[in-house]
């Protein structure tokens, strides 16, 4: 291990409330957590997305089924839920499901403003509160950097009024990285959300920059929208993957992401209870060392 990697990894270990359970009978074991650099609050390394998965409109059967997915998330001690006004009915469906299961304690609400209009942005914040059924939000992000200069001013005011706890910006699919670099260097934000997975590692320099500037990183599209995990499901996992508590491809793909020292959490989306279970399981147990991460990437590339 290079000295720089060792120091990074060791300081991550010291500053995080990591747990290293030795067995995988894990449902009752705690999820690994990492800290949000701006406050030192710790959150579970696996959160959940809602983009397509929770956009089910008024269909009661589908709403109740998604409620079961959400229930499983919290049974495992899940935290961050990410949504946006861009995701159709997702925020409304989340509000429905959260109400049904009684707003579990660990909820870390994260949504976005997505509009070129500054005034409409303020309305979207109020709409989100109503739709989620909350009095304040944990994290409000500027979606895809749309009109971010002005929305960030709105968000700073909301933070000062204690109506949101954290501020962030998002991008995805490797888009607008040079703009994002400027934002990370110049703006006072707590979180950045970007696409990072085993197939798309373009964001690594930005993750490193965020870490340097005390900004928490949310990895979106951890399965590249689903194709990544679906295409390798029938390939064998390497024997040594048991050494890092990987027994499924969900473990392998998600542990790779959240073991990056600069990544705070990943937010896979799913419509299925069984997949939620697999995804949450990936937040439990050992995480790979930098050397093991290299071994994982070599294996992945050889498939
Ligand atoms: N600009 C932005 O701010 C931005 C952009 C993109 C995404 N995001 C956020 O990131 C979240 C995640 O990204 P994403 O929804 O694009 O894609 P993703 O999480 O990479 O992949 C979701 C797909 O993976 C499948 N899946 C999930 N768990 C699985 C498992 N254990 N085994 C097999 N398949 C599994 C799901 O199918 P099943 O339903 O069958 O499980 C679904 O088709 C979004 O929902 C959103 O909250 C933000």
Image (spheres, rainbow, N blue to C red):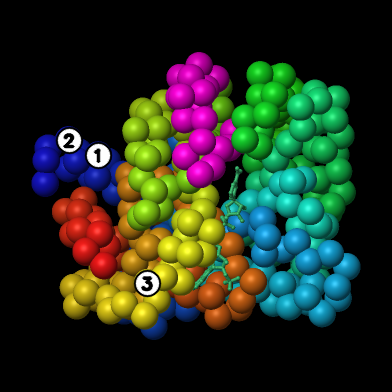
Compared to residue 123, the image places residue 101 above or below, namely below
| Foreground disc of the pair 3, 2 | 3
Q: Which of marks 3 and 2 is nearer the N terminus?
A: 2
Element at label 2: helix
Q: Earlier in the sequence, mark 1 or mark 3?
A: 1
Element at label 1: helix
Mark identifier at residue 4: 2
Compared to residue 199, the image places residue 216 above or below, namely above
Badge 1 vs badge 2, beta-carbon distance below 8 Å: yes
Residue carrying label 3: 232
Q: Position of residue 207 (x, y in %)?
A: 39, 37
Question: Is 177 part of what is drawn in magenta?
Answer: yes
Q: Residues within 10 Å of mark 1 (few under 14, many from 20)?
A: some
Residue visible at 59% across and 54% down in the picture: 80
Residue carrying label 1: 8
Q: Which residue lies furthest to the bottom in this view?
A: 25
Note whether ligand 1 is within 8 Å of mark 2: no
Q: Is residue 273 left or right of residue 60?
A: left
């Amino acid at each position: 291990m290079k000295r720089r990697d060792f120091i990074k990894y060791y300081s991550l270990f010291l500053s995080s409330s990591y747990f290293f359970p030795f067995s995988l009978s894990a449902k009752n074991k705690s999820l690994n957590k990492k800290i949000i650099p701006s406050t030192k609050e710790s959150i579970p390394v696996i959160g959940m997305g809602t983009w397509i998965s929770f956009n089910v409109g008024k269909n009661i059967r589908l709403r109740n089924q998604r409620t079961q997915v959400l229930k499983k998330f919290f049974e495992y001690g899940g935290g961050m839920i990410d949504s946006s006004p861009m995701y159709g009915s997702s925020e409304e469906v989340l509000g429905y499901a959260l109400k049904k299961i009684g707003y579990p304690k660990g909820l870390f609400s994260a949504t976005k403003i997505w509009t070129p209009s500054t005034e409409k942005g303020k309305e979207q914040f109020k709409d989100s509160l109503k739709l989620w059924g909350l009095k304040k939000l944990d994290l409000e992000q500027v979606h895809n950097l749309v009109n971010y200069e002005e929305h960030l001013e709105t968000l700073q005011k909301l933070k000062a009024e204690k109506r949101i706890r954290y501020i962030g910006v998002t991008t995805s699919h490797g888009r607008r990285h040079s703009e994002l670099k400027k934002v990370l260097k110049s703006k006072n934000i707590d979180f950045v959300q970007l696409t990072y997975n085993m197939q798309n590692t373009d964001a690594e320099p930005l993750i490193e920059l965020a870490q340097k500037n005390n900004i928490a990183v949310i990895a979106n599209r951890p399965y590249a929208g689903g194709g990544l995990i679906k295409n390798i499901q029938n390939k064998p996992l390497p024997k040594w993957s048991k050494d890092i508590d990987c027994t499924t491809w969900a473990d392998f793909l998600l542990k790779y992401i959240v073991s990056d020292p600069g990544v705070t959490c990943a937010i896979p989306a799913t419509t299925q209870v069984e997949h939620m279970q697999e995804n949450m399981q990936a937040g439990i147990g050992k995480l790979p060392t930098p050397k093991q991460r290299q071994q994982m990437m070599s294996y992945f590339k050889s498939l």
